[in-house]
Image (cartoon, grey):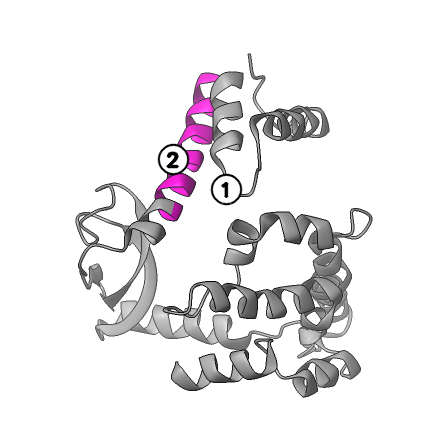
Amino acid sequence: MKEIKEYIKKHEILLPESYIERIKKAQSVGNRHAVSSWNHVWKSVYTMLESFPEYLPNTYLTYYLLSKETVEHSNIERTRANEVMESREKDLFEGVDHYLKTGEISEKAFYAGSHGDWISDLAVAIKNDTHARFLVITENRGAIPNMPYDAMVELPAYIGKDGPEVIARGPIPLFQQGLMMQQLNSEKLIVEACIENSYEKALQAFTLNKTVPSMNVAKSILDDMIEANKGYWPELR
């Protein structure tokens, strides 16, 4: 952790420039991590670490702590979704078509990476009851004392045939708890909005979300999403 932090502070970016240049040149699954939006993420880790140096920030926090800067950097004509569709999704669909025609498996299309290895190891731990340690998302049930009992949290756990044996911890600091509770309540409200067909609760959920700067912006986003998702969403009243 110490060495990673020192590297980020020295180079003002999470990944070495040489690595980014290498994956730009290699026409492989990983090359989407070298595009402009990802470069912004890698550099944002430095910005967040400068203000909050105690922890190494998760890259997802770019959206929550630097939402204004992330939006300003974004290209409305080519979003992160477009980048995924042009790389990983395209490689996978083409690889499936190639396999169905020839029976050959392309490593480029079926690249598993660390997440694939992790899923395989997790399956082995469940089947063989190994009680190996993993980081999993599970119901809190008091593991974090100052989070709701039914909240879904990500914690280390020993995995066996009977499921996770979560490793409990002490209360989390107020700043992190505040971020987590805001997101948790936003998600609970959107679920209630869908069940109750409630426009007001959907608007509350969007307003509460840390990535949305104001109630008026939340309303504009919600109304646009209702229009774009006609036929898929419940009718909100």
The residue under label 2 is 185
Q: Position of residue 36 (x, y in %)?
A: 74, 65
Q: Which residues are magenta?
A: 179-197
Closer to viewer: mark 1 or mark 2: 1
Q: Residue at x 21, y 42 (%)?
A: 149
Q: Residue at x 61, y 70 (%)?
A: 42
Among all residues in the image, which is located at the extreme front? 51
Q: Position of residue 227 (x, y in %)?
A: 71, 24
Q: Residue at x 27, y 73 (%)?
A: 133
Task: Specify which label sits upstream in the sequence, 1 or 2.
Answer: 2
Q: Residue at x 69, y 80 (%)?
A: 20
Q: Residue 214 sits in which quadrant?
A: top right
- Is residue 198 visible in the rendered image? The answer is no
- Is residue 110 visible in the rendered image? The answer is yes
- Above-or-below relation of 77 to 84: above
Instruction: Examine the structure image and report whether residue 181 is included in the region drawn in magenta.
Output: yes
Q: Secondary structure at mark 2?
A: helix
Where, quadrant-wise, is the N terminus in this rendering? bottom left
Question: Given the image, on which type of amino acid does mark 2 rest?
Answer: Asn
Lateral position of residue 34 relative to residue 41, left or right: right
Instruction: Examine the structure image and report whether residue 234 is included in the region drawn in magenta.
Output: no
- Above-or-below relation of 151 to 9: above
The residue under label 1 is 210
The answer to the question of whether label 1 and label 2 lie on touching residues, with beta carbons closer than 8 A, is: no
Q: Residue 2 sits in which quadrant?
A: bottom left
